[in-house]
Image (tube, rainbow, N blue to C red):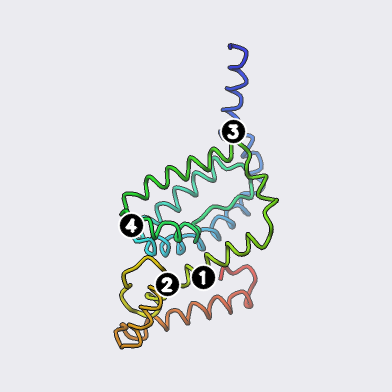
Amino acid sequence: MDESRPGAAAWARSLLPSLSDYSEVPRTWKRDLVAGVTVGVVALPLALAFGVSTGLGAASGVVTAIVAGVVAAVFGGSHVQVSGPTGAMTVVLVPVVHRFGPQAVLVVSILAGAMVILGGVAGIGRYLAYLPWPVVEGFTVGIAVIIFLQQVPAALGVAKPDGENTGVVAARALIEALRGNARGIGPLVLVAVVVAVMAVAPRVHRSLPA
């Protein structure tokens, strides 16, 4: 029994950060700083948007992104790991908040975190390489479509209709806008400006986070 303890202790220590993990910082700190600022420029607006989209508020999105970023930076297992808000969580949390209320998000987060930790300890991530590309692409495109539909009421400047089905909610929002219940053309103009920036910025310089 005593012989197994050093092995278990060494394994536990391997999960924690060590000084050797930061040995390259004196040489790479400039690139690390630029990378961090770039990720922050992209991640914080996403965090604001996803927090509002899930119904938990902008503050929840920003705090979550900052805390998760620090945890990923300190305990992450890769020097090129990028953390940040993901649209998939919006798709998952919107129906949870709608049905069970904001308090359910804490339980869902703890369960999701436990699953990620167990998956990492068990080394399940290596098997993701065997997932067919159409499955990954379909998952990504599906999330994009759902997020697009979730933003239709805001883009049209109408109050979000009731319902859990994003397609039905988007259709109802469009009907309300056609009936003249929209709050002017301001939201549509903002959408057009965002689309224009996303299309033009990479053409100006590839490093610009469109």
Where is residue 135, by image quadrant? bottom right
User: The residue under label 4 is which amino acid type?
Assistant: Arg
Task: Please give left or right for residue 96 compared with residue 30 in the image.
Answer: left
Q: Is residue 115 above or below residue 96?
A: above
Closest to the observer, 209 or 184: 184
Label 3 packing within 10 angstroms: few (<14), some (14-19), many (20+): few
Could you tell me how far apart the alpha carbons at marks 3 and 4 are, in whole angstroms?
43 Å
Residue 85 is situated, as x and y percent measured from the top left of the image, at 49, 57
Label 3: which secondary element: loop
Q: How far is disc 2 from disc 4 in space, using C-alphas?
A: 19 Å
Label 1 Cα neighbours within 10 Å, binned few <14 / some 14-19 / many ≥20: few
Local crowd at mark 4 within 10 Å, few (<14), some, or many (≥20)?
Answer: few
Badge 4 is on which residue?
99
Report helix, strand or loop for mark 1.
helix
Q: Which mark is residue 15?
A: none
For the point 64% across and 50% down, which residue is it?
A: 80
Whether label 3 touches label 1, CB < 8 Å:
no
Q: Could you say which disc has been placed on residue 151 in the image?
A: 2
Q: Amino acid at mark 1?
A: Val
170 and 1: which one is in front?
A: 170
Tell me the distance, in whole angstroms, between the alpha carbons under discs 3 and 2: 43 Å
Q: Amino acid at mark 3?
A: Ser
- Measure the C-alpha gap from mark 4 to mark 1: 22 Å
Residue at the extreme top: 2
Say which label, 4 or 1, has the lower sequence index.
4
Q: In the rendering, which numbered label is found on residue 145?
A: 1
In the rendered image, the vertical position of residue 81 relative to residue 20, given as above or below = below
Reading the chain from its start, which is encountered first: label 3 or label 2? 3
For marks 3 and 4 on the same chain, the one whose residue lies earlier in the sequence: 3
Q: What distance separates the C-alpha of mark 2 from that of mark 1?
A: 10 Å
Please name the residue that numbered disc 3 is placed on. Answer: 18
Name which quarter of the figure residue 25 lies in. Answer: top right
